[in-house]
Amino acid sequence: MAIIEAHDIKKSYGNLEVLHDVDLSVREGEILGLIGPSGSGKSTLLRILDLIEPANEGELSVFGIDTIADRGSWLDLRRRMGMLFQRPIVFNASVYDNVAMGLRYRRAPRDDIDRKVKDALEAVGLSRYIKSRATDLSGGEQQRVALSRVLVTDPEILFLDEPTANLDPTSTATIEAIVTRLNREANMTVVISTHDLAQGQRLAHRVGVMLEGMIAQTGASREIFHEPKDRRIARFVGVQNIVPGRVVSRSDGLTVVEARGKQILSTTPPPADEVEMIVRGEDISLHRREPGHEEAENLFPATVTAIEPTAPFVNVTVHCGCDLVALVTARRAETLGLREGIEVWVSLQAKAVHLIPQAEGGKLTDTG
Amino acid sequence: MNGNPIIEGFIEAIELIVTLNPQVVEITIRSLYISLTATFVATLIALPIGALIYFYEFRGKRAVVSTLQTLYALPTVIVGLLVFLFLSNIGPFGFLRLLYTPGGMIVAQTILIIPLLMGLTVAALSGIDRDKRYTITALGASRLQTVMTIIAEARFAVMAGVLLGFGRAIAEVGTVMIVGGNIRGATRVLTTAIALNTSMANYSLSIALGIILLGVALGVNIVLSLVQRR
């Protein structure tokens, strides 16, 4: 069941339209990752979903309540949700008073507040700072204070707006662990925005890609990473190879695409005549000799033209009519004795070749 | 005595302070009384109005704020002149008989620093950034709770504004001279006494009062920096 249902949400600040027709539904109990570059509207969308500010247009229901029709319900609905922001926000008061804020707004009984605040600070490992001034803590500690401040209010939906963007790895790990546990044990619905693809993949059950104020694609993270709907999404999720080609034939569940005289097989049904092949670098294997029992449908010789280390991997560019970039572990590159100019064999499974319609006339459109 | 009159004046001034010369003590106490009262009254008026200006959206809000900022530098003699006219026998408030009384001086200094306190209150509240306001809303604060949290968060900046107001009040000479009249034993304060005694070549008393005035200003600044460090 959808706990949040948003349709055609628009939001502008002055002349700047930040969100255009956003459609999004969040299922109860899931972790939804919103990934997208800075400035794509993720933070604005989260604020609108958390009812911190209203959209200019569109429909939004939260917990099954139509929030556009029922503006009087906003405070009550907001008190069932919580949000953690990118920048650690603490108030000029003790850590205890910071964490107690939400509960005091809800007029919780004093001993309830006391117990919950102490438990929450215990959970984030900050009990020893309970009486300290919150502004004296480090960034990572402040963010953990901010997280406990949200969690003591037992939100049914938790919004996290790039919560670990500025944090050290330890604080990041603590926050991720807490969020995952709460989702699993308390069935808390979580919407997390991040520009860290790995974090999105690590935490989220489902991922939405946000580009230029729209949700461009939603799906399982495997789907987003391997089968992006268009070129912009492919670029954003870090696909190294986007190769234009023409569909030649389709038979036995395999599409044959010709690119620069080379024929490549794909399992994707042809979306158009003119296509682009989307291939992730890690799906391309390199071999010194022709592999004998390789189960890859595409197998061809190529020349190594460039090697670029990006520890712990190496980006290897090979030329085989068109240029392809393969992602190889540093160790494997060493074993293969890769260097510029040598001949290698490239193998590539047909199911690792995803096809999208070619963008027309250089203009990038989504005809998905 | 044929030494340097400045050095002699300085030595005598220290003597006046250390021996708690009755005239010096009386003028100092009156100065503090008038300026502290004016700051207190101005705070009572300016803080709520400043908060209203910040929290309510209305047409011309920016104009109001920039007018206030312009009035920070309101010439003290202009305020003195206006208050004098209002409190004099020909003015609308002549019947209050406040002219040439400490009460009249309190009124004048209050009017002088109200724009400063209002403007600095608005600035202090504006210093609470957008993300903090979002956080307060997201934590489930009602409208009134939001206002109270923002004011509490800005408390040190507001306090700094109040201290600046007091500093301006106690150091100014224009309004207290015109409205108070610098009457010995009645309306003479630190600044007017320094002006008068200097023109009468009574340097030692001037220097003594000057040291005290500087001390007060220094004290305000020390408190200010303590407040701002929080």
Image (tube, coloured by chain):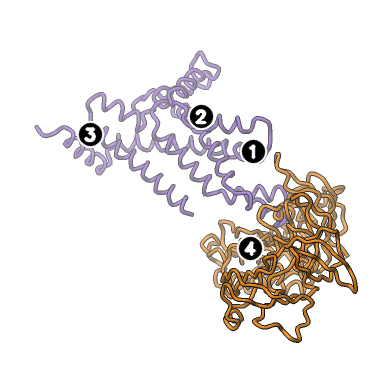
Chain colours: A orange, B purple
Q: Quadrant of residue A243?
A: bottom right
Q: Position of residue B175 (x, y in %)?
A: 43, 26
Identify the amino acid type marked 1: Leu
| Image: A322 above or below A10 | below
Give the number of the mark in front: 2 or 3.
2
Q: Nearer the viewer, residue B142 or A262?
A: A262
Secondary element type, mark 4: helix
For the residues labelled 2 and 3, the Cα–Cα distance comes to: 35 Å
**Residue at 68% across / 51% down in the picture?**
B145
Mark 2 lies on residue: B71
Instruction: Return the mark for residue B52.
Output: 1
Q: Position of residue A73 (x, y in %)?
A: 82, 52
User: Are the residues flagged by discs 2 and 1 in contact, CB closer than 8 Å?
Assistant: no
Mark 4 lies on residue: A146
Identify the amino acid type marked 2: Leu
Q: Nearer the viewer, residue A205 or B103?
A: A205
Secondary element type, mark 1: helix
Outermost residue on the front side: it is: A261
Chain hosting mark 3: B
Instruction: Return the mark for residue B204.
Output: 3
Q: Quadrant of residue B123?
A: top right
Q: Nearer the viewer, residue A342 or B100?
A: A342
**Residue at 48% across / 37% down in the picture?**
B37
For the residues labelled 2 and 4, the Cα–Cα distance comes to: 40 Å
Please give left or right for residue A105 compared with residue B82 in the image: right
Secondary element type, mark 2: helix
> Crowding at label 1, few (<14), some or many (≥20) Cα neighbours within 10 Å?
some
